């Protein structure tokens, strides 16, 4: 899956915003696969340059550290939690936000799916 | 991003926020590099999630292979749609949302429905966005061994989600 996404990103002629409704383990495994290669690069910092970098949020700390192996336990996702990441044409992965549930903030009883 | 009318006449095609230059003489100022932005969203709470939150025993007793959303999961999906279709989507720099992909499980298909309606998008069902282990049942309810379950058949999916685009590998056997 990660390889397919990298190939898609490399072939893009223009930027695309895609929402994927999937599953906890799928999202965790995909994040592992995407960030593992990014962490293995000689330069671990995201490669976005110029003025666009200023508009990006700081990545999740564990993504930059990149010391983890493939495991579902590296990530947590609430039900309808949103994780946003960019894949550049060069294959760099930049995680913009992880498991945000601000849409549930007004009704905290709706937050579910992660054991404390 | 700046384009003059003269450049447009030379072949710059504009579609919403996208700019694709087809004429060599067209100029675009400071165009950001193309990138694929993914918003990975976990489905709303399923009935299996409800059992799971109660106890292992409740989960093993009540679990079904392809559960529907719980009432709370439905509400989560509705709020997700409002959020991504409005200010939340803008705050996440996701607008316009160009594509909506969804795994072929009932809980993800149901989660996508309000968002698809809010965005006016056709959900694209993809079997590659699959749950770990797939759709499965515990043999004899013992949870010591499992067998694959076909999930929704093509006919069932068409019936329950008529506006969704189905790939060829969603078949009559699920």
Image (cartoon, coloured by chain):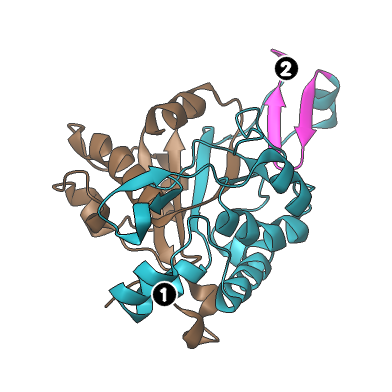
Chain colours: A brown, B cyan
Residue B56, quarter of the rendered image: bottom left
Nearer-the-camera pick, A67 or B56: B56
Q: In the rendered image, which quarter contains the C terminus of chain B?
A: top right
Label 2 neighbour load within 10 Å: few <14, some 14-19, many 20+: few
Q: Looking at the image, is mark 2 or mark 1 earlier in the sequence?
A: 2
Residue B89: horizontal and vertical position, in percent? 61, 61
Residue B45 visible here: no
- Name the residue carrying label 2: B22
- Name the residue carrying label 1: B51
Nearer-the-camera pick, B111 or B69: B69
The secondary element bearing badge 1 is classed as: helix
The magenta region covers B10-25
Q: Residue at x 21, y 40 (%)?
A: A39
The secondary element bearing badge 2 is classed as: loop
Q: CA distance from mark 2 to mark 1?
A: 55 Å
Q: Hey, which residue is sitting farthest top in the picture?
A: B24
Q: Hey, which residue is sitting farthest front in the picture?
A: B140
Residue A42: horizontal and vertical position, in percent? 17, 31
Q: Residue at x 77, y 59 (%)?
A: B117
Name the side, left or right, on which B167 lies relative to B142: right
């Amino acid at each position: 899956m990660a390889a397919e996404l990298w190939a898609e990103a490399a072939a893009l002629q223009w930027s695309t915003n895609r929402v994927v409704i999937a599953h906890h383990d799928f999202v965790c495994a995909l994040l592992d696969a995407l960030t593992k290669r990014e962490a293995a690069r000689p330069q671990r910092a995201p490669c976005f340059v110029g003025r666009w970098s200023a508009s990006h949020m700081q990545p999740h700390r564990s993504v930059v550290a990149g010391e983890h192996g493939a495991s579902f336990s590296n990530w947590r996702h609430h039900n309808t939690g949103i994780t946003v990441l960019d894949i550049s044409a060069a294959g760099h992965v930049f995680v913009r936000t992880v498991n945000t549930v601000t849409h549930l903030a007004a009704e905290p009883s709706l937050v579910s799916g992660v054991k404390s | 991003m700046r384009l003059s009318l003269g450049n447009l006449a030379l072949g710059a095609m504009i579609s919403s926020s996208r700019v694709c230059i087809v004429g060599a003489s067209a100029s675009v100022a400071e165009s950001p590099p193309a990138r694929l932005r993914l918003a990975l969203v976990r489905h709303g709470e399923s009935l299996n999630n409800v059992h799971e939150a109660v106890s292992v025993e409740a989960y093993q007793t009540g679990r079904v292979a392809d559960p529907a959303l719980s009432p709370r999961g439905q509400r989560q999906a509705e709020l997700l749609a409002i959020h991504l279709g409005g200010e939340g989507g803008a705050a996440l720099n996701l607008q316009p949302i160009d594509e909506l992909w969804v795994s072929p499980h009932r809980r993800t298909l149901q989660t996508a429905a309000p968002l698809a309606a809010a965005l006016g998008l056709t959900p694209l069902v993809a079997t590659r966005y699959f749950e770990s282990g797939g759709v499965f049942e515990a043999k004899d309810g013992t949870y010591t061994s499992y067998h694959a379950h076909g999930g929704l058949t093509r006919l069932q999916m068409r019936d329950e989600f008529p506006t969704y685009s189905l790939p060829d590998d969603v078949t009559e056997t699920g």
